[in-house]
Image: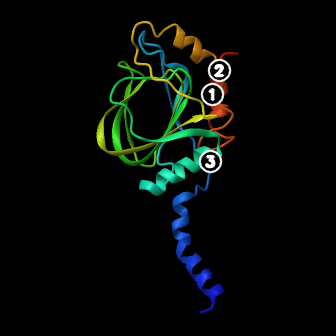
């Protein structure tokens, strides 16, 4: 057997599969702003959703998300789901990559917006923005944080604020977008930052 011909032929078989892990252009996210509702602080920065951002699914999709996020300095990742109660993080922004299933999520607290998410979507949640899983099927999520920050869980209980508000206000705008690197989030969020 000629190994060079075998390897070349085998590589051609894999080429269609390589599309599962590549993007041909920079994607533009949908933007959602949620105002402070008195319980959940939310943010002046928009939550960003990249719909159908990648094609890989299951464990291959989870691995692709972990690598892509890590390559863009969003680390400290985990695989799981989304909590079924309103919560927010004050110590870090968060990215959620959906590698399987779907869910209806309630974003921005009780007065926010309900949005369907599904495998292939990537959601970037500014610190302070509430999120809750209202139910779905087979949801698989990779979460990660800029610069590998540690995260906390706040639920809007009395006594969390104003401490969490101060922590949120001190967070920097990440230097990279977890999907698009130098493009996307840094420019979008800086345009919303107070001058």
Q: Earlier in the sequence, mark 3 or mark 1?
A: 3
What residue lies at 52% left-to-right and 27% top-to-bottom?
151
**Mark on residue 189?**
1
Q: Residues within 10 Å of mark 1 (few under 14, many from 20)?
A: some
The answer to whether residue 56 is seen in the rendering is no
Q: CA distance from mark 2 to mark 3?
A: 23 Å
Quadrant of the drawing holding the C terminus = top right
**Mark on residue 158?**
none
The answer to whether residue 192 is seen in the rendering is yes
- Give the vertical position of 85 relative to 35 (above or below): below
Label 2 SS: loop
Q: Residues within 10 Å of mark 3 (few under 14, many from 20)?
A: few
- State the residue position of label 2: 193
Residue 2 placement: quadrant: bottom right
- Verify CB contact (< 8 Å) between mark 1 and mark 2: yes
- Give the vertical position of 103 relative to 100 (above or below): above
What residue lies at 61% left-to-right and 35% top-to-bottom?
148
Q: Nearer the viewer, residue 23 or 56?
A: 56
Q: Nearer the viewer, residue 158 or 35?
A: 158
The answer to whether residue 109 is left or right of residue 162 is: left
- State the residue position of label 3: 26
In the rendered image, residue 98, in percent from the top left (x then y), is placed at 44, 45
Q: CA distance from mark 3 to mark 1?
A: 17 Å
What residue lies at 34% left-to-right and 39% top-to-bottom?
103
- Give the vertical position of 54 relative to 49 (above or below): below
Residue 72 placement: quadrant: top right
Label 1 SS: helix
The answer to whether residue 62 is left or right of residue 137 is: right
Residue 111 placement: quadrant: top left
Q: CA distance from mark 1 to mark 2?
A: 6 Å
């Amino acid at each position: 057997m000629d190994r060079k011909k075998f390897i070349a032929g085998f590589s051609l078989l894999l080429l269609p599969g390589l599309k599962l892990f590549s993007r041909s252009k920079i994607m533009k996210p949908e933007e959602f702003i949620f105002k402070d509702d008195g319980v959940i602080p939310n943010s002046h920065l928009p939550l960003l959703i990249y719909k159908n951002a990648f094609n890989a699914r299951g464990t291959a999709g989870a691995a692709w998300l972990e690598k892509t996020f890590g390559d863009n300095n969003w680390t400290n990742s985990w695989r799981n789901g989304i909590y079924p109660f309103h919560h927010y993080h004050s110590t870090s922004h968060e990215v959620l990559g959906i590698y399987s299933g779907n869910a209806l999520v309630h974003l921005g607290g009780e007065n926010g917006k309900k949005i369907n998410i599904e495998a292939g979507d990537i959601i970037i949640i500014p610190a302070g923005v509430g999120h809750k899983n209202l139910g779905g099927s087979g949801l698989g999520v990779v979460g990660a944080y800029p610069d590998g920050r540690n995260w906390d869980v706040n639920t809007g209980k009395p006594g969390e604020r104003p401490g969490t508000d101060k922590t949120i206000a001190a967070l920097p705008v990440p230097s990279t977008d977890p999907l698009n690197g130098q493009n996307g989030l840094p420019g979008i969020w800086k345009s919303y930052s107070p001058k």
